[in-house]
Image (cartoon, grey):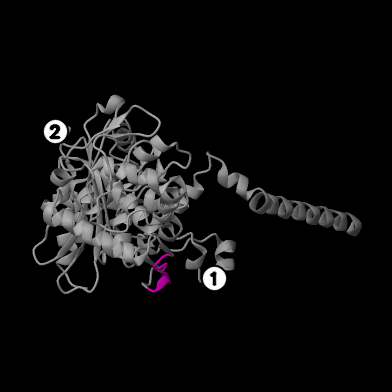
Amino acid sequence: MTRHIRHAGLFCALLLVALLLNAARVQVVQAPEYDRNPANRRPDIARYEEPRGDILVGGRPVTGSKDTREHLRYERTYTDGPLYAPVTGFASQLYGTTLLEKAEDGVLSGTDPRLAPFPLWNDFTRARNSGGDVVTTLDPAAQRAAYEGLAGLKGAVAALDPSTGRILALVSRPSYDPQPLSGNGSAAARAWARLASDKDRPMLNRAARQTYPPGSAFKVVTAAAALDAGVVRDLDAPTDSPDPYTLPGTRTRLTNASRGCRDASLREAFTLSCNTVFAKLGVEVGGTDMTATAQAFGFNNPALRIPFPVARSTFDTSLDRAQLGLSSIGQYNTRATPLQMAMVAAAVANGGQVREPYLVERTTRPSGSTLAAPGSRAVRQAMYPSTAVRLRALMREVVENGTGRRAAIRGAKVGGKTGTAQHGLGNSGMPYAWFISWAQGDRDLAPRVAVAVVVEEAEARRRDISGGGDAAPIARAVMEAVLAHPR
């Protein structure tokens, strides 16, 4: 009898070992496979069982969490959703995350290992930490000025602090409210279908994820290349530029929207925005130096993140001389995001140095203590400091005596450059209106803000330099908002 009991006990022990081995196989070896299985809702339930951390602007949250008391318990909410959507993106239980919600998802959702005080214990218990917060660099007054300035228009605004690269405003219109996308029901699906089918593409971040031909605003880059290369030494010397200018190796004749461009000096050509002068200067500088200068400003950089990826601004590296001439006036294959053109203006304002832009000031733990503070990014010299000094003077003349008068601010030094970029088959589309600028308050030691504005389908006659009329007032409002409160 004892032998039978011993055998039965041994058999039960073997069954227990087999049960433990199978449990270990399921919970450890096969756990990743089960986690990835679409039929497994536990990861989603765990993800939304705690409120998501917040995104802060000016010290105040522009996001929140709503308790739905459903399986996916907490749903994302947004304050002033359309105003900040080009920065926050959305966090949807159906469609995932975008922009800052995606780039900082680990911190906001609580999955970032740095938020776990006892990581090994969390791995054992599968507990989830509370989400941390993301503090942005945005200036709420500048963001609102840009948003209101674009009311009824299609376009974008980017504003930077030239000395640090902090993004002060990032606006795209038309915009959208991320709130209806947050849930997982039919209302969220209907909102997605409506936004995805909208021909105006409100979910597109035009400030950082859309490129445009920069037109005459790119002449700042061409002027920098010409001055650095020594092609132009005297701002007031005639440039020996015909009007019209026949592009090298072609019969195509380039003309100007303004009179007085024949043999104009660089100072005159910059103020009048002479296509002929700058196309010829680009050809004289040459493809190698033009490309090097454009890339020093940030063109052709596929790795820029703020922290979400920014569309690559391009300056073609394989051009014949005619194409180089067109590229040097911001046409042909030259394309730029508004954020990139704000970097161009910021480099002029910052003595020729380019600070890579960033949007996150710091991330914090739920307790409020700092988790990480990325701070200022790498510095690049886009041009000689002496060139930047001369370009600041040229940009000031555009505002004081040229096409950018509507950007002038009483009591402040303001520099700018207008631009009109043609597009469409045979340049048949309404032009894009550009204005890039910087501003320095009367008590400031250096410029405090650099802005780029683009307006699509600008309401201007074809031959008008519409950046001065459509985009410059928006830039002025943003610059005034930044200068209104001292550092």
In this view, the residue in front, 240 or 155, is 240
Direction from residue 227 to residue 143 in the image, left or right? left
Q: Residue at x 18, y 57 (%)?
A: 478
For label 1, the crowd category at 10 Å Cα-Cα, with few meaning under 14, some 14 to 19 and many 20 or more, is few
- In space, the residues marked 1 and 2 are separated at their CA atoms by 65 Å
Residue 129 location, x and y as percent? 46, 63
Q: Is residue 478 above or below residue 325?
A: below
Q: Amino acid at mark 1?
A: Phe
For label 2, the crowd category at 10 Å Cα-Cα, with few meaning under 14, some 14 to 19 and many 20 or more, is few
Q: Amino acid at mark 2?
A: Arg
In this view, the residue in front, 98 or 267, is 267
Q: Residue at x 28, y 48 (%)?
A: 239
Q: Residue at x 28, y 57 (%)?
A: 345
Residue 304 location, x and y as percent? 43, 53
Give the main secondary structure, helix, strand or loop, of the magenta stretch.
Answer: loop
The quadrant in which the C terminus is found is: bottom left
Magenta stretch, residue numbers = 369-377
Q: Quadrant of residue 104?
A: bottom left
Name the residue beneath numbered marker 1: 118
Residue 95 numbered tag: none
Q: Is residue 375 magenta?
A: yes
Q: Residue at x 51, y 61 (%)?
A: 127
- Asked whether the viewer can see residue 127, the reply is yes
Under circle 1, the secondary element is: loop
Name the residue beneath numbered marker 2: 461
Residue 364 location, x and y as percent? 39, 68
Under circle 2, the secondary element is: loop
Camera-near label (1 vs 2) is: 2
